[in-house]
Image (cartoon, rainbow, N blue to C red):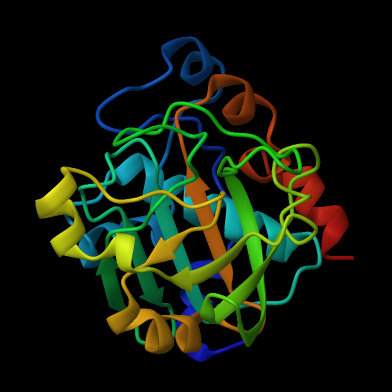
Amino acid sequence: MPKSLYRFRQKKHVPRLLAGSAGVVFGALLASTGAVASPLGDTLQKLAPNADKHVLSMAAEAMQCAEYHGQPDANTLAVIDYSKPSTARRLWVFDLSKPALLFHERVAHGSATGDNKATFFSNKPGSHASSIGLYRTANSYYGSKGYALRLKGLEDGVNDNAYRRAIVMHGADYAKPSFVKRIGRLGRSWGCPAVRPAIVKPLINSLKGGQYLFAYYPKPDWIKHSDYLHCTASQQAQASR
């Protein structure tokens, strides 16, 4: 584990997080848990002050929970906040070893997920919708979309079909700022998080090979039931044995 990450991960448990974005907090859920930012969440917020602090805290919680349950440690974390419109820069990529903010970009969502604003998410093959939740990144490759990055969804029933659906990060002309000026929103993919071609290669190179991507939307059922957002001390103690 990189020494600079140790201060974030040395505690025996990670606070339970249940919060929404854009100022929306799920009061009924919070009442039973209490939302407390983690040290890593605090650091991410300092690096990206325009991002929703609850979303960053949940991303930190999910990543740390995965590591407690046996997933390898990573040096890079990407966060997508799908509660923001496609015209907003809603993708952040963090280098955790420095720590530093590497990228702050626009990212497209699936054609079935919505127009400018995302409203619908699916894990089903052929849905042409984006999926939320926690992912591990796999290998990069050159395919029909150019340089691309395979993603493996870690959440059963939420995004675990991503690899089979060929949900990958890739570049697309419809993710350029010029497309927004012309159409009023980004274009849409078949569920892939597409970014502008000019930054796709360095962005993918920062994320490939077993890093984390956390895609957020204020969907109460997912927030309430996601294993990665409810990493209790007892679960972590068992995972660390």
Relative vertical location of residue 184 with respect to residue 220 in this rendering, above or below: below
Q: Nearer the viewer, residue 100 or 174?
A: 174
- Residue 64, image x, y percentages: 61, 60
Left/right placement of residue 232 relative to residue 175 reads right
- Residue 4, image x, y percentages: 44, 85
Left/right placement of residue 225 relative to residue 132 reads right
Query: Which residue appears at 49% of the width and 56% of the height?
Result: 60
Relative vertical location of residue 178 with respect to residue 238 in this rendering, above or below: below
Relative vertical location of residue 144 with respect to residue 194 in this rendering, above or below: below
- Residue 122, image x, y percentages: 65, 35
Left/right placement of residue 17 relative to residue 107 reads right
Res 195 visible: yes
Q: Nearer the viewer, residue 10 or 53?
A: 53
Q: Nearer the viewer, residue 93 or 31?
A: 93
Relative vertical location of residue 154 with respect to residue 152 in this rendering, above or below: above
Which image quarter: residue 114?
top left
- Residue 74, image x, y percentages: 60, 78
Query: Which residue appears at 42% of the width and 13% of the height?
Result: 27
Query: Which residue appears at 67% of the width and 55% of the height?
Result: 65
Query: Which residue appears at 50% of the width and 49% of the height?
Result: 215
Left/right placement of residue 69 relative to residue 87 reads right
